[in-house]
């Protein structure tokens, strides 16, 4: 294979970034509407900016400390010297993705509200364009970081190995794997911190504003209302962006690492990178097909978005075949077709998981409608119903992932060569994520529409505008649910590929080390138990964090209602910044313990149980994390929509006892679906990444 | 080793059964109190009898079908000819244990109420004696079944192999393993059916009686009140008995099987059996120390029960050493001490898990008190709080099990011989369960005290009697919680031993079969995912079943309040039998699907993924099942006691908004702690048992 084709990756990156820039310009060209709208949007922007500034300051300290620690360890010879720098670069780009996504989202909210006052299609286009900025920034920066490191390592640091392809690529992939840890750490902080912020504000605003004071949602008299809108941006935009940045980069790097042991050489390494580049083009083309008429029903709107993702998928299906055929360095033709089948299975798995997420969480289907009906017998039954719905909903995604892994593995030659089979599994994750640009655009669109609805409400725009923003917002709930399913599915596949990359890493450190990964080997088994427990522990920590932060907000809102004269009468303005500040502080403080759990666990388990124990822990955490994340996301989504179903006039409608019960369900579901559930995705990848980086240390000092 | 020592096992069995008989006579010698008490107790007895009759009829059909299926398979050569008979005998004895336990519990309830009117100590003695009947029946019948098969196989069926010890014991243990499947199936039906019955009645009685009609708990006007009392017996007595019967027998048989590959011969097989026999004696001695004064505070009462279990534990600690020293057929003296250490670690793990269960669920400690306080901000916060408390509470039990397994494994020589290490793990499970006689007695005591309280209420006994029965009942909640922790811990250890026994079984079927149990082997990994999902699916099914059955009860109770004239005024009697009948029918219908899930999953996974996949599934289901069961039991227990804490006058007391929120938590917790959670224990053992029995079939027909 001619090496010049690697240039396709940076080319794809530049294309994606240019497209993101073009979309950003387009969004900024729209009007921000009237004075009130500008003021509200400005407040949200300011709050989000303040939050990110504080978050990045805090995280910088963490990164500086880690850089020093990793530096010391490289100095002592446990890590290659690139690790500290790779760590920083991964964290930086992951954080930058979130930052840019949030900047544009907070700029687009009032513009979406204003555009909706002209036509539904225009509103959709603005919100979706803003989502695209995020989607293509993530893809572009991911490919950029990958490319920079790849070229630096290949042509500068390891140029001396140019004659020995296998050795060179093995070194390159080992070094590149470590920057995933930086991305994961950043993603975890963003997701956990953002998740805590958004739900503390949401729960706090609801508990005092809606329940105690009896004022409607998004009412400007509620001091937590701006914090609530800020929360949508920092949690669902910045957090989600950092999360998927990490999956995207992680799956590509892991597959490159697997290409080495599969014996595919640089051709095998090129496939994921080129496919990502091709996927970027496919995604860009897809975005041009997203448009709608004036029908505000969910089906037409969903179809408008779906058209774009479907077209992108079809394009990548067509393009992946020649890419694999051309680059895959093997004589065995059926095997190339098999690797192609792996790509298809990954794409299909992503679509199917998304569909079943929708099935279990949308009120157009039976499960959520039944859940809605269970609110008639009170809060206890809707809680039990939601939990059991979430648990039941794990069956099909597990089967989908199982079939996808099996198919990818055996089609890619796993029967004859273990490593080639696993390369297929890695490729299927890359396939699933290849259209990330547009998938993430449809997902990041949600919070913008949500904010737009809030702004329309707060600035008293005409009825039909609210109707349109409501329709856009509802659609956002559905895309958020499918987006979550997609994020979980890709995280599981990426984590699986990373586990294997971890084992490769051990071989590099100690080629003669004898692994005993048998599931009945006690360290493996015990690692499995510990890994199984970690997602539960982690979820508990994040839920408790939300509870504590929400409590502070409740007290602040109560204080303002009490102390600010004329607030309830609409004569004085609430101190929005105080609530934003409390959420910010709370989120910063509370994100530390869960994040440290993710980083410390693999090291402690490694020192106590050895590398076999770590492998067991990773497998246990990945399997349980996947199942628990699906459960929490779907329970939460179903409760949310069950409540909306009642608000639409069913089972007594707003204000009925059934509605009150459904509100309880929705409140329980909030941390499930927006804090704990999505954070688990990152946890399982971070655990693998940390294990990989500290493999040398563990090999040296572990007890077993 | 002289073989005559095996006679100690049947001797222990006879002793246990005689002691159970003696205790039963003692209980029946007490007065049943006045006419009303006798009438109520009679109604409960009749309801429980009707339920068991129907359950055993239904289960008989299942057993007959399975007998035929297993018979056909033995005929075709996939199973040894003993399997169908062993299956039936395991099911029969497991069912008989539950039956006898329930007979005595329903005979003891009014007697406990009556005895409490004389003195607290007398009430405690009657209830505890009734619990002892159950405890020692389980132990006695378990040892009896084991002994019968052991002697039949050794001296009749495999007498021809007498010269070849290794071959003979290998055949014997393989045949004996299969009767665990009968016991597991029976236990699952009993636990799931009983759990559905009890919670449907409880929830139904509460929702209409307490919430809608506003009458107090245990009010005789509530048509579901007898069903509620029946439920305590069929769920917590018969179900728990069958569950622990299965753990007890399973751990002993698995350890015998492990003795073979460890090379310990009949001496190694004798250790678990003799230790069980010695444990029976220790338990009997312990029961004589259970007595209390007239102080109704929880601490004194708990101490009264604890004294008995502690003394039994000390006795077994003293006796286990000579047993191991004498029987263990190895020259290596330190290793015998190591196996002894394994016993100690098992005992200690049981005590510690019990203690931490109490810590997380009793309102004398911080977690439940904090949970109680979270009811002040409404039902949503107490639900989130309870779930995160349950999740957090999984950390320590996982570490306890991990350390116990590690210690047992390495102390017993796992560093040098894998099989000897695993034998140590099996022995630690046997150690944990050796004092089952008295542990189960303290546990089975609870429902009797609960029923006694109900009868005291319904028959309007004097205030101080209610105070005493309330104290006994409260104590029962604590012992139930620790009993659940114990049941879960022993189930996990037993299941681990069974996984290894499964692998031995495969070697017997196909000695040259090459297992690849590496955690990254795709079939293993996928099996792991499926296994991880199964406890979630299973819990969902059982929770939904409770919901449906409770719905029927709600409708029936509403109907009776509407149709029976004078019921609310206390002039007409409610149709109690109708509610019992509905619960019975509901439980029978609803227990089928979850039970079939447990039986079919290993076969389907085996056929699709092969034996490696089954091993992955078992490991995943055991780890996740353990964590999820702990979480559900502790969340449920904490909600229950948080409610009781408020009812004791804290945070506004009965009738306050905080109390209403706490009731929601308690209602959600009911199926958690009494249906889904405890059923998971049996699920994980049943999965292993079914895998073992069908290993030959899977080896023959699987795709992979």
Image (spheres, coloured by chain):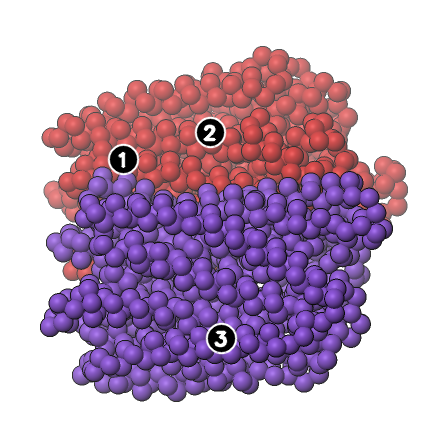
Chain colours: A red, B purple
Examine the rendering and report whether any part of residue A472 can be seen.
Answer: yes
Q: What residue is rendered at 18% in x and 54% in y?
A: B509
Q: Which of A470 and B131 is in front in this view?
A: B131
Q: Which of A149 and B301 is in front in this view?
A: B301
Q: What residue is rendered at 78% in x and 40% in y?
A: B563
Marks 1 and 2, the one that precedes in the sequence: 2
Asked which secondary structure carries label 3, the reply is: helix
Instruction: Tell me how far mark 3 sits from mark 2, CA to CA.
Output: 58 Å
- Image position of A321 with respect to A82: above or below: above
Q: What residue is rendered at 29% in x and 61% in y?
A: B177
Instruction: Tell me how far mark 1 sits from mark 2, CA to CA.
Output: 21 Å
Asked which secondary structure carries label 1, the reply is: helix
Residue at label 1? A408
Q: In which quarter of the image is residue A40?
A: top right
**Can marks 1 and 2 be said to lie on one chain?**
yes
Chain letter, disc 3 residue: B
């Amino acid at each position: 294979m001619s090496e010049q084709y690697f240039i396709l990756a940076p080319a794809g990156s530049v294309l994606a970034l240019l497209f993101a820039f073009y979309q950003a310009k387009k969004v900024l060209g729209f009007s921000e509407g009237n004075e009130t709208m500008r003021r509200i949007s400005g407040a949200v922007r300011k709050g989000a900016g303040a939050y990110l500034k504080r978050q990045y300051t805090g995280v910088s300290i963490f990164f500086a400390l880690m850089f020093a620690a990793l530096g010391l360890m490289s100095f002592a010879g446990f890590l290659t010297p690139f690790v500290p720098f790779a760590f920083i670069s991964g964290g930086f780009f992951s954080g930058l993705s979130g930052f840019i996504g949030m900047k544009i989202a907070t700029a687009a909210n009032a513009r979406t509200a204003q555009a909706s006052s002209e036509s539904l299609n225009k509103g959709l286009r603005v919100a979706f364009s803003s989502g695209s900025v995020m989607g293509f920034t993530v893809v572009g920066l991911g490919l950029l970081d990958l490319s920079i490191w790849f070229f630096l390592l290949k042509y500068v640091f390891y140029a001396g190995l140019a004659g020995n392809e296998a050795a060179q690529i093995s070194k390159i992939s080992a070094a590149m794997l470590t920057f995933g840890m930086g991305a994961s750490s950043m993603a975890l902080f963003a997701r956990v911190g953002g998740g805590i912020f958004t739900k503390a504000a949401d729960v706090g605003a609801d508990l005092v504003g809606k329940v105690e004071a009896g004022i409607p949602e998004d009412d400007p008299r509620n001091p937590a209302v701006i914090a609530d809108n800020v929360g949508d941006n920092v949690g669902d935009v910045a957090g989600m962006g950092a999360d998927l940045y990490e999956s995207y980069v992680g799956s590509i790097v892991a597959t490159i690492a697997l290409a080495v042991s599969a014996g595919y050489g640089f051709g095998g390494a090129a496939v994921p990178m080129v496919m990502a580049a091709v996927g970027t083009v496919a995604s860009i083309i897809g975005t041009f097909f997203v448009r709608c008429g004036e029908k505000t029903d969910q089906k037409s709107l969903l179809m408008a978005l779906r058209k774009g993702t479907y077209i992108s998928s079809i394009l990548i299906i067509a393009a992946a075949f020649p890419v694999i055929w051309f680059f895959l360095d093997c004589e065995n033709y059926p095997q190339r077709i098999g690797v192609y089948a792996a790509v298809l299975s990954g794409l299909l798995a992503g679509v199917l998981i998304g569909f079943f997420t929708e099935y279990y969480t949308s009120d157009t289907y039976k499960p959520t409608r039944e859940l809605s009906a269970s609110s008639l017998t009170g809060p206890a039954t809707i809680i039990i119903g939601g939990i059991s719905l979430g648990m039941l909903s794990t069956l099909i995604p597990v089967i989908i992932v199982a079939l996808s892994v099996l198919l990818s593995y055996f089609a890619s030659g796993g029967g004859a060569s273990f490593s080639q089979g696993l390369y297929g599994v890695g490729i299927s994750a890359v396939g699933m994520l290849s259209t990330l640009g547009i998938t993430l655009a449809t997902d990041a669109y949600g919070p913008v529409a949500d904010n737009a609805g809030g702004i329309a409400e707060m600035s008293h725009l005409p009825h039909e505008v609210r109707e349109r923003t409501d329709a856009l917002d509802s659609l956002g709930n559905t895309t958020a649910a499918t987006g979550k399913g997609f994020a979980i599915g890709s995280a599981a596949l990426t984590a699986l590929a990373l586990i294997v990359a971890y084992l490769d890493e051990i071989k590099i450190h100690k080629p003669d080390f004898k692994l005993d990964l048998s599931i009945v080997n006690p360290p493996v088994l015990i690692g499995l138990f510990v890994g199984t427990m970690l997602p539960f522990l982690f979820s508990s920590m994040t839920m408790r964090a939300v509870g504590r932060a929400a409590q502070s907000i409740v007290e602040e809102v109560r204080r303002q209602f009490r102390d600010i004269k004329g607030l309830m009468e609409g004569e004085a303005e609430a101190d929005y910044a105080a609530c934003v500040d409390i959420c910010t502080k709370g989120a910063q403080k509370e994100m530390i313990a869960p994040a440290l759990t993710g980083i410390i666990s693999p090291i402690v388990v490694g020192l106590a149980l050895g590398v076999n124990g770590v492998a067991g822990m990773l497998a246990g955490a990945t399997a349980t994390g996947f199942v628990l994340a699906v459960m929490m996301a779907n329970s939460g989504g179903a409760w949310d929509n069950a409540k909306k179903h009642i608000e639409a006039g069913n089972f007594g409608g707003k204000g009925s006892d059934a509605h009150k019960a459904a509100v309880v369900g929705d409140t329980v579901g909030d941390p499930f679906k927006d804090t704990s559930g999505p954070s688990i995705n990152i946890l399982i990848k971070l655990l693998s990444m940390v294990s990989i980086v500290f493999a040398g240390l563990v090999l040296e000092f572990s007890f077993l």
